[in-house]
Amino acid sequence: MDYNKLADLLYPTAVNTDVWENKYPKRELKTGAEVTRFAPSPTGSLHIGHFFQCLCDSYIAKSTGGLFFFRVEDTDKKREVEGSVDNAINTLEKFGIFYDEGVMKNGEEKGEYGPYLQSARTEIYRSYAKKLVASGRAYPCFCEKPENFEEVKEKRQEQLEENFALQQKDPCRDLSLEEVEQKLSQNKPFALRLKSLGDPEKSFKFKDEVKGEREIRENSKDIILIKSDGLPVYAFAHAVDDHLMRTTLVIRGEEWYPSLASHLELFDAMGFERVKYAHNPVISKIDENGGKRKISKRKDKEGNMAYFIETGYPVNSIKEYLLTLANSNFEIWRRQNPEKSLEEFEFKAEKITSSNPMFDFAKLNDISKTIISKMTAEEVYQELSRWASEFDKEFFEVISRDENYTKAVLNIDRETPKPRKDIAKMSDVKESVWGYMFNEYFKPEYELENANVENLKEVVATYTNIYNHADTKDEWFARIKEMSGGLGYAVDNKEFKANPEKFKGNVALVCEYIRIALTGRKNSPDLYSISQVLGENEVKRRFELLLKSI
Ligand code: GLU
């Protein structure tokens, strides 16, 4: 077979690959500097796993003095969701992840190694396709896809495209030049396949930056490289792009590991220097049936980065939490350096956890509550307004109406040596933490389980008459104690414990009643501060409201 002739027949206008090799020379970087990239497919909101990789990419590029670029892998037009690229860019921007090169908003790009949008690189792919054909390492396949291909593909996504119907050697492998010519003259569409030289009985050693050294079976599949619509599949585009964009370290999801042998064969067949790989674990969860599974964008809210943005988690809470999942030494570092900024952490690829981490909301919330508890009221206010102005316009109006009042609310039990840890995300402020401090959201719905309603009303009615808004904290408490004694509550807790039947309860119970009246709840932050911030009129209005409502 005259492979050069076959190559000319298939790709008559493709330019020589030297053009591209010269256009995208090796990058001049210091030894050890890693070039990493984030390369999502535009299929909707950013998946948490992708963001996780992206975080690793940017850290490694920065800590090695290398660079990090953003490529869009948009070769599967059927799966594309409009707006995904802008969404990804906005998410990265929001999370303070900056790339040195790549696709930007409004279709613009920065960097010398573009285009960074795969669909704009067909000319480049055609050159390398031609080169492979000319060297006898790829051939056209005119077979039609099985009828249920789309359905099956839905399930296993793009990887399947590389593998379908490859159990036997493809019949098109041995077509003669004349046969190819004839099919082309009938305008038959063709896909391009790799002519694999691998032997599935043989294996070779490979060092993955995360998994360590492994034994891998040789690829023997004639994977598809270019689909009949002229667009490349992942494997081919990955090899060509990461070669020409001079990537040194590919950090990607574990799901690509099974097809690694075919990617390596492709790099070798095209004469490319191999890149290093770090196959990241996939963030998983325990599903309804108790089994482990990968977090899904469709099924799980935490699968979407949009969820964290929309509910108002601070950027650093998410990053900090993901770093605990990513780098096995992060938590130790954090304990030793509680005040350092995340940027100072020295991220190491070899410390990426190799087993699949479980997503744990309780831990994320705990981390986030600690982070927010250390912020000043002013900082929380800024974070809250930023979030509310975008995601809860009505609440935004409420909190901005009297900025000082909102800051006073946020300052309760804050900026003290032991600040209260109760806000994990900005939507908590209205929904579960501070809603009652805003009159619009305070409803006469009281937590009354096990409460003696008559006693509660008696306490509130008495307290209304003696309440003095000018009291200092000590005076305020002394007044409550005095009232408690008068109404038959124990002021001394020891006495109460010794003879509980002699009393209606103790001072703590009296405070709980007042708390229920002011906040609707049995638990709340410091009651004195709450009264002070609410103001005299509102305190009295709430007492009246309780007496009227129950
Ligand atoms: N487009 C691929 C994905 O979305 C990228 C994998 C890679 O980083 O190489 O999973």
Image: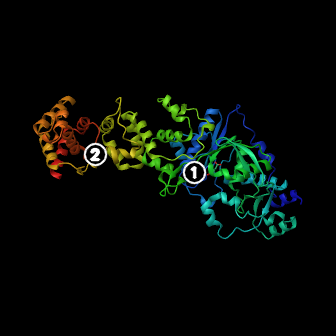
Q: Which residue is the extreme one toward the left?
A: 486
Front-most of 163 and 84? 163
Q: Mark 2 to mark 1: distance in Å? A: 40 Å
Mark 2, residues whose alpha carbon is within 10 Å: few (<14), some, or many (≥20)? Answer: many
Q: Locate residue 487, reporting x and y percent.
A: 11, 40
Q: Which residue is the extreme one toward the right?
A: 2
- The answer to whether residue 90 is left or right of residue 442 is right
Q: Ligand 1 near label 1 (Cβ, under 8 Å)? A: no
- How many callouts does the rendering have? 2
* Residue 513 in sight from this viewpoint: yes
Q: Identity of the amino acid at label 1?
A: Val
Mark 1, residues whose alpha carbon is within 10 Å: few (<14), some, or many (≥20)? Answer: many
Tag 2 near tag 1, CB within 8 Å: no
Q: Locate residue 37, reporting x and y percent.
A: 64, 43
- The answer to whether residue 386 is left or right of residue 355 is left
State the quadrant of the N terminus: bottom right
Coloring basis for residues: rainbow
Q: Ligand 1 near label 2 (Cβ, under 8 Å)? A: no
Q: Locate residue 537, reporting x and y percent.
A: 18, 41
Residue on which disc 2 sits: 436
Q: Identity of the amino acid at label 2?
A: Tyr
* Residue 70 in sight from this viewpoint: no
Residue on which disc 1 sits: 85
| Residue drawn at 59 percent across, 35 percent down | 347
Front-most of 294 and 378? 294
Q: Locate residue 264, reporting x and y percent.
A: 74, 48
User: Label for residue 129?
Assistant: none
